[in-house]
Image: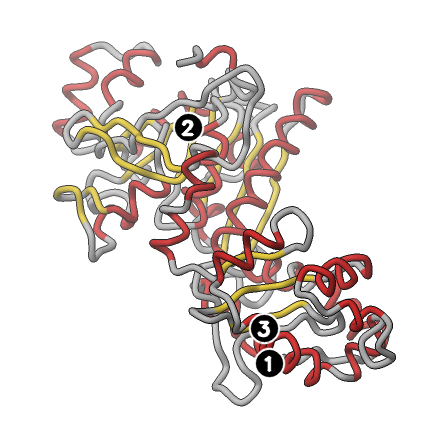
């Protein structure tokens, strides 16, 4: 395995007061790329609540959920509400680049983990806050979760069949996108601090990210008052064919999002007359006659199984099979690209997880499973200069565990 020093974020140190999904997902992105992430967990409340999120476990306090978000990190048990714990935190802050949290919006100031409270011991520290609704405004003290954001930001009105009840994404997409956005914010903050010598606060919220993800749909409404609604078969709102179609044994998603692909598709399925048919010849015509496009394609595609159509379209027309989660993870392409990786746990052995989506030329990424609760507490305290007797005293006071 490549040494940690050769990874792009080697030397970046992050103190992470985090739990559950979005926050740990953010720091895991950076840990995979070589950053040292020190995960702070309260010894008096069981640490990261993600450790007990079921229904699947490797062992007590080590759920599959927790392992999905916390690889390549270090864990320090530390009670930040005690004066002795506060002192340890400030010692850590003096030697780190980023203090990150995903607490409720009103809590960072109360806990003293914002820039105003920490800059005295490290003027260059970057404080990144991930919350439900931000640290300002009428909802700063509100708890919030992914599905609520999907509901309020319009996602449920865009997902599913037109005549079905409002439908959420199958994944916690807002948590994942907010975590990724927070990782970007951390890197932006460090870049700025290394240029100016001064840190700052940066904020990311679930709600802001959910609304930002509306992207072109938002622009259509804000500038033309066009309200996008659900389309049958998950169709693109303006491009056709760009939807689900039936095969002999299932479904296939076809996306002719450039005009040239329609001509290629027509040739592959043996219908060259579609290219010049006035009802099918261009985007505008096909959108107007979307029902006919669906009937024609279903009629042709039902003659063969999905795998055969994938073989015929491969590299010519943008297309994908419709898989369930098991089929997706066990596909030949996933294996070819080595996208499922074994992360090594000292007790459980190899734990399979999905690889980082970032590939680093000339380097392999670390593959350590998520840390046990407080696994690195003693080592980190020794690095900060605490003697064995000091650590014993902290443990006796349950400042650490």
Q: Is mark 3 on a helix, strand or loop?
A: helix
- Looking at the picture, how far across and down is residue 255, in whole percent? 67, 62
Residue at image position (82%, 69%) is 275
Does residue 338 appear left or right of residue 135 in this picture?
left
Disc 1 target residue: 232
Residue at image position (72%, 21%) is 195
Residue at image position (81%, 57%) is 260
Mark 2 surroundings within 10 Å by alpha-carbon count, few (fewer than 14), some (14 through 19), many (20 or more): many
Residue 3 falls in image quadrant: top left
Mark 1 surroundings within 10 Å by alpha-carbon count, few (fewer than 14), some (14 through 19), many (20 or more): some
Q: Is mark 2 on a helix, strand or loop?
A: strand
Q: Which of marks 2 and 1 is nearer the N terminus?
A: 2
Q: Is residue 261 above or below residue 288?
A: above
Disc 3 target residue: 234
- Looking at the picture, how far across and down is residue 80, in whole percent? 32, 37
Q: Pick the quarter of the image with the C terminus.
A: top left
- Looking at the picture, how far across and down is residue 2, in whole percent? 44, 12
> As rendered, which of 74 and 127 lies closer to the eye?
74
Does residue 390 appear left or right of residue 188 in this picture?
left
The reply to whether discs 2 and 1 touch (Cβ–Cβ < 8 Å) is no
- Looking at the picture, how far across and down is residue 164, in whole percent? 49, 86
Whole-number angstrom distance, CA of label 3 to CA of label 2: 39 Å
> As rendered, which of 101 and 162 lies closer to the eye?
162
Mark 3 surroundings within 10 Å by alpha-carbon count, few (fewer than 14), some (14 through 19), many (20 or more): some
Q: Earlier in the sequence, mark 3 or mark 2?
A: 2
Q: Which of marks 2 and 1 is in front?
A: 1
Disc 2 target residue: 37
Q: What element carries label 1?
A: helix
Q: Pick the quarter of the image with the N terminus.
A: top left
């Amino acid at each position: 395995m490549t040494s940690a020093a050769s990874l792009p974020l080697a030397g970046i140190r992050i103190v992470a007061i985090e739990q559950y999904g979005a926050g740990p997902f953010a720091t895991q992105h950076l840990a995979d790329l070589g950053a040292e992430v020190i995960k702070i967990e309260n010894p008096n409340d069981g640490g990261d609540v993600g450790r007990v999120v079921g229904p699947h476990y490797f062992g007590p306090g080590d759920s599959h959920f927790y392992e999905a978000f916390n690889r390549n990190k270090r864990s320090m048990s530390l009670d930040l509400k005690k004066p002795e714990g506060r002192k340890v935190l400030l010692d850590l802050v003096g030697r780190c680049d980023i203090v990150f949290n995903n607490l409720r919006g009103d809590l960072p100031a109360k806990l003293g983990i914002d820039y105003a409270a920490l800059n005295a011991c490290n003027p260059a520290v970057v404080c990144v806050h991930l919350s439900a609704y931000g640290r300002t405004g009428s909802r700063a003290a509100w708890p919030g979760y992914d599905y609520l954001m999907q509901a309020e930001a319009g996602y449920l009105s865009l997902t599913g069949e037109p005549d079905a009840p409002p439908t959420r994404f199958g994944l916690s997409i807002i948590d994942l996108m907010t975590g990724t956005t927070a990782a970007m914010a951390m890197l932006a903050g460090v870049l700025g601090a290394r240029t100016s010598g001064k840190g700052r606060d940066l904020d990311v919220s679930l709600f802001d990210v959910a609304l930002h993800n509306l992207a072109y749909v938002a622009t259509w409404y804000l500038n033309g008052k066009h309200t996008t609604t659900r389309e049958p078969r998950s169709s693109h709102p303006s491009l056709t064919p760009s939807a689900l179609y039936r095969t002999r044994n299932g479904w296939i998603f076809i996306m002719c999002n450039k005009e040239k692909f329609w001509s290629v598709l027509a040739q592959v399925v043996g219908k060259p007359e579609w290219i010049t048919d006035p009802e099918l010849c261009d985007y505008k015509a096909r959108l107007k006659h979307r029902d006919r496009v669906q009937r024609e394609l279903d009629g042709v595609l039902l003659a063969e199984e999905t795998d055969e159509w994938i073989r015929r379209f491969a590299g010519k027309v943008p297309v994908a099979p419709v898989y369930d989660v098991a089929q997706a993870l066990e596909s030949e392409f996933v294996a070819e690209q080595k996208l499922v990786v074994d992360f090594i746990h000292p007790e459980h052995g190899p734990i399979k997880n999905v690889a980082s989506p970032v590939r680093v030329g000339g380097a392999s990424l670390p593959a350590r499973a998520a840390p046990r609760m407080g696994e690195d507490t003693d080592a980190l305290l020794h690095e900060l200069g605490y003697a064995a007797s000091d650590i014993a005293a902290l443990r006796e006071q349950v400042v650490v565990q």
